Every structure is written in C-alpha cells, then in structure tokens.
C-alpha cells in the first residue's frame, strides 16, 4: 500500500512432497509458496497477514501455522491490506490448503495468545503443533497439540460405566461413573449423562459430568455419552440402579456453625462451618444473621452433598444485606437450621443452632 515500505519475502523453512517444494516465509505478512522442483516455477501462493512459521504436508493437504489472524487469498502476504479483501477469510494461526491448487480448506481450529504458533509438522494423517498457546479449538491444551488429518473421521470410544451398588446397602445412595473413552485424534474427551425413571421411555436433560449419584427409591436408568469439542460423540451406555425403600434408617447429619464469619464487599456477610452426613439426602443449611451494632440483617441458604461416612466437610453461605445497612467487622448473631431426608426411612432429619460469631 502507498506509504508503506516493501519488505522482501524471507524464506525460513521448507517442506517437500514428491516433485513439489513448499516454502514458508515472512516479510510483509507471511506467504506459502508451492514450487516445481524441476525448474523452480511457482504452482501457487497463499498470503496471510502475519508470519508463516511452519508448514506440513500429508495426504494432499498443506497445513500452515503462523502469527496471523487472516488468510489474504492466493496472493503474497500483507500486514496492512488483507482482512476483508476478495477471497480473504478469518483464520486464527492455523489453516489448511489443497496441495494441488492452494485453495483454502474449511479446516480452521483457533489457536489463542498473541503469537500462538511456533512449529508444525504433518505425516501419516496426523498434524502436530507447538507454540505458546494454552487453548486450541476451545480446548485447554498447553504448548503442544495433535490433530487427525483434515476431513478424517474422528471416533470416540464408548465409555465404561460402573456403579458402587455392590458396596452400598440396598437403600443406597448409588454413584454411577463413566470412564475410559478416548478420541481417535488424541484430543480431550468429556462426558454427559441422563436419567430415566420410567424404563427409558423418557430421559432427563443432559448434564455434564463423569458421575451422578442416585438417591431415589425404585429403579433408575443412568446413561453416559462421551464427546469432544468438535461435536464427535460415542454411543450412549446405560446402567440400571435399583434402590429399596425403607431399610431401617440410621442416617446421621450434624451441622456446626463457625465462631467467625466474613464481612465482605457490598455489605454482605459470609457464614461458614462444617458438617457431617451419612445415609441421607443432600443437606439444606439456611438461616439468618443479624448485627445489632449496625442494624444489618440477611438470610442465607446453601445445599451441600451428603458425603457419607463420619468425616466432616466445610460449608459456607452468603447472606446479602440488600438495600439495608451493611455488615461490618464485629459481633453478629446467627440462627442456623438444617434439613435432610433419611434415605432408609424417608423420614425428615432437622436441627438448629444459635451462635454468636465475629465478623472480620
């Protein structure tokens, strides 16, 4: 463009496939060249608005990595006039080109950070990249990642689904867990699950996570599916859990309120403490906190899981001052209540505690 000095194309690397040489370079933007090895004539070129730092070739596709955010088209690279020109397209540091024609392909995983890419290699249907990135295609992955070739089918193996019913009393609860799924391209795999209480006639909405705890009496079907960030999925794998009603009870729940709390931002206060729970449903802890010196008051409520056994766990809840006086450092009165359900008898478990706490 007028007013900008021309910077010569600087070749910094090569890749070869048969009688074709591919050159990567920097200068005014970045450029990939396809050259005939016999006479040096150019087959095609592809330009970008940032340096090209690596190219790899496999199965008819050229992969170009660099410090760019846009493909300029079948033209030399250009730092200043690229995005929005005819034939240009957004590309976040990775792109794929047809080996024979140089045409831009749809494969376009995004790579984060300012520079992102520093190296790329391709062979036998795989593409590997290295750089300063911490996310690739929205997946948390630091500094190195590997892909299947562009257009290759990606398969996710079915998860192994198991439960702890054999080690639990017949009145539950039972935790069902999925594990073991892998992607054929080596990427990260996550899990989602659904439940059904009518024999699979209808299913709940999908929830993310590799485990779910069933507490309801009767038979519950739990199914898991593995998936990756590219939308590839495994089949659903189903487990059946049966929990008997009754069973004699014996559940125990205790809740302790700490002698200290926190007067936080916005005039709110945090109430905290510890609890134990065995053989019961999740525990609801709620109550009020008042501070006579300021006139501040608020309510709090939190639901915590029943962890089983006798080990204690921590809980905390936020009491909002709302539009009234703000909580400040000093003494405050807490009235706390808790409730849960005995999984053996379905009976209610309740309790309360009144404590003077010090906010700091």
Image: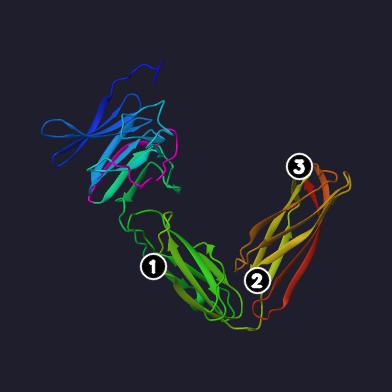
Q: Secondary structure at mark 1?
A: loop
Q: Position of residue 312 (x, y in %)?
A: 63, 61
Instruction: Decide if residue 346 is on the left or right side of residue 156.
Output: right
Q: Position of residue 77 (x, y in %)?
A: 33, 29
Bounds of the magenta segment: 103-124
Q: Nearer the viewer, residue 175 or 185?
A: 185
Task: Residue under label 1, please give it.
Answer: 158
State which tag comes first along the sequence, 3 or 2.
3
Question: Is the residue marked by circle 2 packed among few (<14), some (14-19), or many (20+) residues within 10 Å?
Answer: many
Kindly report the distance in space between the C-alpha atoms of the residues bearing marks 1 and 2: 31 Å
Q: Is the C-beta separation of discs 1 and 3 under 8 Å? A: no
State which tag comes first along the sequence, 1 or 3.
1
Task: Residue under label 2, please give it.
Answer: 281
Instruction: Determine which of the numbered discs, if any, sits on residue 266 in the image.
Output: 3
Residue at 33% x, 18% y: name it.
Answer: 6
Q: Is the C-beta separation of discs 3 and 2 under 8 Å? A: no
Kindly report the distance in space between the C-alpha atoms of the residues bearing marks 1 and 3: 48 Å
Residue at 37% x, 53% y: name it.
Answer: 187
State which tag comes first along the sequence, 1 or 2.
1
* Number of the front mark, 1 or 2: 1
Q: Is residue 305 above or below residue 103?
A: below
């Amino acid at each position: 463009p007028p007013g900008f000095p021309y910077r010569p194309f600087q070749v910094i690397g090569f890749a070869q496939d048969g009688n074709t040489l591919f050159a990567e370079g920097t200068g005014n933007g970045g450029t990939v060249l396809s050259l005939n090895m016999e006479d040096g004539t150019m087959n095609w070129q592809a330009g970008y608005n940032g340096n090209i730092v690596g190219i790899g070739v496999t199965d008819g596709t050229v992969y170009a990595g660099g410090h760019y955010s846009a493909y300029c088209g079948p033209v030399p690279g250009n730092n200043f006039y690229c995005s929005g020109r005819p034939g240009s397209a957004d590309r976040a540091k990775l792109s794929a080109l047809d080996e024979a024609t140089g045409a831009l392909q749809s494969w376009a995983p995004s790579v984060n950070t300012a520079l992102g890419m520093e190296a790329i290699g391709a062979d036998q249907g795989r593409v590997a990249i290295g750089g300063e990135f911490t996310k690739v295609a929205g997946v948390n992955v630091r500094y190195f990642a590997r892909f299947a070739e562009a257009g290759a089918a990606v398969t996710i193996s079915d998860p192994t689904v198991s439960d702890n019913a054999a080690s639990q009393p017949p009145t539950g609860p039972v935790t069902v867990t999925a594990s073991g799924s892998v992607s054929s391209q080596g990427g990260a795999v996550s899990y989602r699950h659904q439940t059904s209480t009518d024999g699979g006639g209808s299913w709940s909405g999908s929830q993310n996570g590799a485990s779910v705890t069933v507490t309801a009496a009767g038979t519950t079907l739990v199914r898991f599916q593995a998936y990756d960030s590219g939308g590839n999925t495994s089949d659903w794998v189903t487990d059946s859990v049966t929990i008997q009603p009754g069973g004699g009870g014996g559940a125990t729940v205790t809740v302790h309120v700490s002698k200290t709390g926190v007067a936080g931002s916005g005039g709110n206060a945090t109430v905290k403490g510890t609890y134990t729970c065995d053989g019961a449903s999740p525990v609801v802890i709620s109550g009020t906190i008042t501070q006579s010196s300021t006139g501040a008051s608020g309510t709090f409520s939190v639901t915590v899981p029943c962890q089983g056994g006798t080990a204690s766990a921590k809980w905390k809840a936020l009491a909002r001052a709302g539009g009234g006086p703000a909580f400040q450092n000093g003494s405050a009165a807490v009235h706390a209540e808790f409730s849960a359900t005995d999984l053996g008898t379905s009976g209610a478990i309740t309790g309360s505690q009144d404590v003077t706490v010090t906010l700091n």
